[in-house]
Image (tube, rainbow, N blue to C red):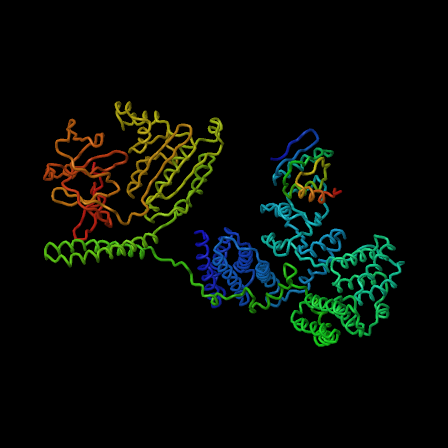
Amino acid sequence: MGIEIHDDTLRISDILGVEDAEILLEWLLKNPGGAVDLAECTHLHAANLQVLMASPPRITNWPDDALLADWLKHALNQEE
Amino acid sequence: MNPLLDQFISESRDTIQSIGERLLQLENAPADHELMNELFRLVHTLKGNSGLFDFPEMTRVLHGAEDLMDAVRDSRIGYSQSLADQLLEAMDFISALLDEILDGGDASLPADTERTAAAMVLTDSLRQLITAQATQEDTATPAPETLLARDPAMASCAEAQIPEAARMEAYRQIIQGQACSWMSYQPEEDCFFKGEDPFYQITQLPAPLWRRVTAREPWPAPETLDAYRCLLHFESIVPMDLQGLTGHFRYIPDQVQLSSLSPAALAIPTGDAHDSIPAAEYLQTATEHLQSGDHEGLIQASRLLLELSSPKLRVASALRWLLLVMETRPDDVPLQQQLLDDIRHGAGIDTDAANAAAPSSLAPNMRDMSDPIAGIIATQAEILALTDVPPWLPGRLRAIAASLRAAFTHVGQLTLIEGLDEALQAALERNQSTPLARWLADQALPSAAEANTVLAAPPIAATVPPAAPSDTATSAGETRKFGRRMEDAHAGPSAIKVDQAKIDRLMNLIGEMIVAKNALPYLAARAENVFGVRELSREIRGQYSTLNRIADEMQDAIMQVRLLPVSFVFQRFPRLVRDTAHKLGKEVRLILEGEETEADKNVIESLADPLVHIIRNSLDHGLETPEERRAAGKPAAGRLTIRARSESDRVVIEIADDGRGIDPTVIRRKAYEKGIIDEQTLERLTDQEALNLIFAPGFSTAGQVSDLSGRGVGMDVVRTAVARVNGSIDLKSQPGEGTRLRLSLPLSMAVTNVMVIVSAGQRFGVAMDAVAETVQIAQTNIQRIKHQTATVLRDRVVPLVTLNDLLGLDEAQVPNEDGELAVVVVRIENDFLGIIVDDCRETVDIILKPLAGFLGNLQGYAGSALLGDGSVLLVLNPRELL
């Protein structure tokens, strides 16, 4: 579960819990140009969603889960 | 139904009853603080208990009641009649819920829109009492307008923001029979601290047709963002019916707005205004086509205009909707009319012009386009007024009837459409529109004006929460659907509380009954032997077997009453383990299993102290500190499992830990140091025997005397306590892997089965539990090893003692005619011992009474019992005798 950092990309896998929101926010603040890879993310807690919405990063991969990806794309105003 | 729920229901009923009583007492003494505190406490308890289960409605209402009582208790608001009424009403609601739960027999209630709504209304009115009274005592009639503002009008505003494509998709779904609902969910700001995950709630719903996530205020700069203050606002169209959606959000009904979508509500044209479109002409043709039922013509005309208009215009949107409606529901004339009206509005053509275009003589107020329903009804009247008889007249009549039904249903005037079907039938038979027209004139036209007012009130069923909770505070007396009074339903409580002394008395009486019953065989024997009446003897025996059966059942029944689940003792362990572990700086995970296992009250109660001691030992000596555990490659948190289960007529309780285990060599050395065993024994002992040494008196393994265990109260005390209730204990341990203690206890100890033995002319009893077998042994087979006699029984050496020796009687045991001695082989722990007696007799059920008074100190006896012939039987305790 959780967060993996690869240079300037944050890889999120499985479930991002409520405590992870602070880590996520901190990382986004430190890496303003950073990208987030959500491919293996199955769910993220609403607090994380807030963080992503408030400081939208570049998303390299959307979640494989179509429903989650759909919600996230709309939340981050990046729907095609 | 699980026992916890059972208990909850019966307790809640009691509490509700008490709340009612307190409220009535308060009416006589409104300033009694004691009573108010009591009342608060009761409501508080009830709320707390309800939280154990999945009854959000109940908890919600009780929470409201609790807040109210809190305000009363703090004298923020005064006690009043209406307050009592409200509270009683809330309690009736809870009562009704309890009934429902009882009927369902399940710890969860199915979601019910109506119930959720009722709970909301009740809670709102309870809360309103707080604010209303706090601000201006009694006069407050809160402005209903503010609460009514949330109505379909607002909802349709929101719907209008949804892109047309999504709305059309929803429309198609609804037409195909898939109910769709509109959802707007604004989680509370502090919801994350309540363990809620709004996004999870949302993603658990089926894929939405449209969705939007916004913030309720602009996002602050990321540096100042508080990730844990929830600002999210979710909106979506979900392909779910309102019922299902309400169920999904049943815990947070106040944070969501839900409404079910109807085709008409979705078909809202959006876009830029237009002026240069030749709409007037189109409208005239379109209206004519619509009225004459010429679908093709209407479609043609609409397509033509659509091609002419820029797709972004409002008129284009309306036309697209019109075409969609024509395609999917060609009979839905009202909706088509509504869309045409929209185009007319947009085109800036005033209603008079429209009236002029339409062959109509209706009063302007009837054609008022701001009120589509009245407009629709009026339009139907117009069409009915046509005198022509086209070939499509039956279709037209049906369309009109359908429109009227829809219109009246929409405004909630269901009673009005009663005669509609008959009128339609008559019209169809006569192939003319008069019957329908007459019906409409009779029924509807007078009420068309009313339809206006009806429309103003939102259809309650369609929106959650229902509007108008405001008036309930003032009209508290009126009965609601859920306001079933407690007295209405005479649902007698299914459980009664009984003083334990009464149960004990009943048990004693049954015990005496068993003794009296046991007298019958003696009587039968006397009848036969002394008086020589064989016939009577047989009849007495017959009676005896009947009585025996009934007495057995009675005994069984009273046992059932006395049964308690082991959770009675187990429930204190989580706290004990937590505190103890904390004190010791250890991490422990406690696992309780089989808490529902039942045993006699006395057995359960006698278990409490030994178990506490065992658990302390496990925590103190067994489990290692987190560091030690990590070093040993185990998880930092130790595991302590307490497991109870029934095994035939015994209860087995296992206490297992995954700690360091017990090292037999350490035990051997300690026991030797303390002089419990001598050097020879030290060599001879097996590992298991060494482990059993911890039960020896005066043994304590702890290196240092700790605060918790190891204060002289050793495992021998535990063993004695367990033995006192005829239980046994054994221990298994693997160094490094953990220790397992197994306690085996009788289910009940009220009636004991004993064997009667005779020695030195006296009768004694020995508990059958302890008796392994009885044998006759020829005197020649008894060997003397030093001062100890023994015999070989089934290839095993069994030491023998004579009972007379044990009891200090100076008499020899009497052999039978064949020179054999009767031997009772008893099991003491895992060893066998043969006790030589004079004779073994029958076994009897007795009620064992411990020796009391001066005899209480006497060792060697388990107690005494009264026999059927009136004599007293002393029951031996072989272990103490030795």
Along the horizontal axis of the image, is B508 left or right of B708? left
Whether residue B130 is visible to the viewer of this picture, yes or no, is no
Asked whether B618 or B78 is in front, the reply is: B618
Camera-side residue of B321 and B627: B321
Q: Is residue B656 above or below residue B298?
A: above
B106 over B426 or under it: above or below: above
- Left or right of B102 on screen, residue B663: left
Is residue B372 visible in this depiction of the protein? yes
Q: How many marks?
A: 0
Residue B99 position in % (x across, y down): 48, 60
Whether B444 is drawn above or below B182: the answer is below
Residue B644 on image: x %, y %: 39, 42
Quarter holding residue B519: bottom left
Q: Is residue B503 left or right of residue A9?
A: left
Q: Position of residue B822 (x, y in %)?
A: 16, 38
The C terminus of chain B lies in quadrant: top left
Foreground of the two, B435 or B205: B435
* Of residues B169 and A57, the one drawn nearer to the viewer in this rendering: B169
Q: Position of residue B676 (x, y in %)?
A: 27, 28
